[in-house]
C-alpha cells in the first residue's frame, strides 16, 4: 500500500460525513440503524411425514380405490387394488406345483409303501416254496433214475424246473432289496432341487400378485385422490393413486433467503401467520436446517418479487392443535436471538 492510498483510507475513516448543504454531522448525531428482530420467509404447511404419493409397483388397470380424501389410513392398509385374476391364477398353479414336488420328495425319502414291501416279501416266500418243491421233485427223479425206474427225460425236466425256481427266487429277492433300499443320493438331490424350483416359482408369483395390491406406507390421512377404478396406472411414478400424510403434527417448510441463512439455527423460535387467520400468530421452532441452496418454490402475490433468488429450506415444527390445512401458504418469521451482554 502506497502513502496516497493510506491517506485516502485514513481520511474516509476520520472525516465526518457531509449533508447535502455541506454541513458536517458529528458522529454522535448519525442515525443508528434499528436491528432486525425476525427473519421473514414464505413457506407452506405440510404434514410431518411430508406428502407421500402412493403409486402402483406394476402397470395395470385399477379394479378398486378403497379410500377417499380425508379418510384415515393405517400403515399396511390396502388403499387400491389392480385387476389381478391372472396373477392369482399363477399363485394357485405355483402352490399345486409345490405340493407335487413335495410329494415326490417324500416318496423318495420314505421309499416304497408298506403294501408294496409286503407284496415283495410274499413273492420271495412264493419263489422259495417253488424252489423247495422243485428240489424235492428233482431228488425223487434222480433216485428213480439211479434205480433205472425213471427216464432221463423226466430227470432233465425236473432239473430245468429246479433252475427256473432258483432264478425266480433270486429275482424276487432282488425286487425285495430294491423296495427296501433307501433312495440314492442323486435321486434325493433331484427331488430336493425340483421342490426348491417349485417354491421359487411360487414366491415369484406371490410377489407379482402382492404388487397388484397397493398399501399405505404410513399411518395418516388421505390428502388427495388422483385416480379412480378403471383407470390405467404404471410403475413409472407418473400416475400416483393417492397422496397421504401424517397430520398428527404439522410443520412449515420455509424458504429463507441466502442473505439471512447465517442467522438461522436449530431450535430457533419462530411463528407463522396466514391471511386466512388474520393476526393470529402460530408458534413453532426450527427443527431442521437444509444443507443445499435451491430456487424458490413458494411465491407471494407481489408482481415485483424476484423469482430467481436462492433460498434454503428451513423446517419449522408447529405446536399441536393448529388446525391449519396442509399446503396452506404462510408467512414465516424466525426470531433472531438477542446478543448476549459481555461480562
Image (cartoon, rainbow, N blue to C red):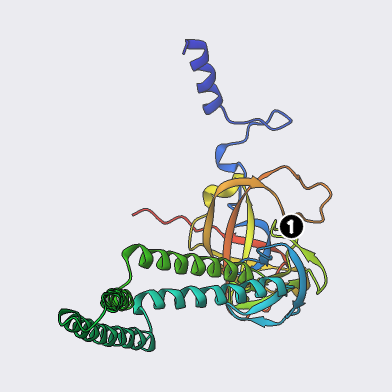
Name which quarter of the figure residue 66 lies in: bottom right
Name which quarter of the figure residue 321 lies in: bottom right
Q: Nearer the viewer, residue 76 or 174?
A: 174
Is 125 located above or below residue 295 in the figure? below
Q: Which residue is under mark 1?
A: 238
Measuring 65% from the left and 66% from the top, which residue is drawn there? 52
Is residue 45 left or right of 228 when viewed as pictured? left
Q: Nearer the viewer, residue 114 or 336?
A: 114
Residue 108 screen position, x and y as percent: 38, 74
Measuring 66% from the left and 82% from the top, which residue is drawn there? 72
Measuring 40% from the left and 68% from the top, which residue is drawn there? 192
Task: Name the quarter where the C terminus is drawn.
Answer: bottom left
Q: Is residue 146 visible?
A: yes
Measuring 58% from the left and 71% from the top, which residue is drawn there? 206
Residue 207 screen position, x and y as percent: 58, 68
Q: Is residue 84 visible?
A: no
Residue 252 screen position, x and y as percent: 63, 65
Name which quarter of the figure residue 122 lies in: bottom left
Amino acid at each position: 500500500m502506497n502513502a496516497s492510498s493510506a491517506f485516502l483510507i485514513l481520511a474516509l475513516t476520520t472525516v465526518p460525513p457531509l449533508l447535502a448543504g455541506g454541513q458536517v454531522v458529528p458522529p454522535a448525531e448519525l442515525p443508528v440503524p434499528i436491528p432486525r428482530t425476525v427473519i421473514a420467509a414464505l413457506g407452506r404447511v405440510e404434514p410431518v411425514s411430508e406428502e407421500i404419493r402412493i403409486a402402483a409397483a406394476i402397470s395395470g388397470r385399477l379394479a378398486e380405490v378403497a379410500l377417499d380424501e380425508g379418510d384415515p389410513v393405517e400403515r399396511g392398509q390396502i388403499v387400491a387394488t389392480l385387476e389381478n385374476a391372472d396373477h392369482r391364477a399363477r399363485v394357485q398353479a405355483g402352490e399345486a406345483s409345490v405340493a407335487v414336488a413335495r410329494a415326490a420328495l417324500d416318496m423318495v425319502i420314505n421309499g416304497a409303501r408298506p403294501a408294496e414291501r409286503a407284496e415283495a416279501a410274499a413273492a420271495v416266500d412264493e419263489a422259495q416254496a417253488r424252489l423247495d418243491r422243485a428240489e424235492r421233485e428233482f431228488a425223487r427223479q434222480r433216485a428213480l433214475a439211479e434205480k433205472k425206474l425213471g427216464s432221463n427225460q423226466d430227470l432233465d425236466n425236473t432239473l430245468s424246473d429246479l433252475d427256473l425256481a432258483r432264478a425266480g427266487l433270486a429275482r424276487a429277492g432282488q425286487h425285495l432289496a430294491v423296495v427296501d433300499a433307501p433312495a440314492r443320493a442323486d435321486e434325493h438331490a433331484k427331488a430336493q432341487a425340483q421342490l426348491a424350483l417349485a417354491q421359487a416359482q411360487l414366491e415369484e408369483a406371490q410377489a407379482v400378485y402382492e404388487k397388484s395390491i397397493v398399501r399405505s406406507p404410513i399411518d395418516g390421512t388421505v390428502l388427495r385422490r388422483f385416480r379412480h377404478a378403471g383407470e390405467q396406472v404404471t410403475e413409472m411414478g407418473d400416475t400416483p393413486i393417492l397422496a397421504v400424510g401424517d397430520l398428527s403434527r404439522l410443520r412449515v417448510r420455509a424458504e429463507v433467503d441466502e442473505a439471512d441463512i447465517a442467522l438461522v439455527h436449530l431450535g430457533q423460535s419462530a411463528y407463522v401467520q396466514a391471511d386466512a387467520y388474520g393476526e393470529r400468530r402460530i408458534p413453532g421452532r426450527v427443527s431442521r436446517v437444509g444443507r443445499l441452496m435451491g430456487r424458490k418454490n413458494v411465491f407471494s402475490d407481489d408482481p415485483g418479487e424476484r423469482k430467481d433468488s436462492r433460498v434454503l429450506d428451513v423446517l419449522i415444527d408447529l405446536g399441536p392443535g393448529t388446525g391449519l390445512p396442509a399446503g396452506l401458504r404462510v408467512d414465516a418469521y424466525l426470531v433472531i436471538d438477542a446478543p448476549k451482554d459481555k461480562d
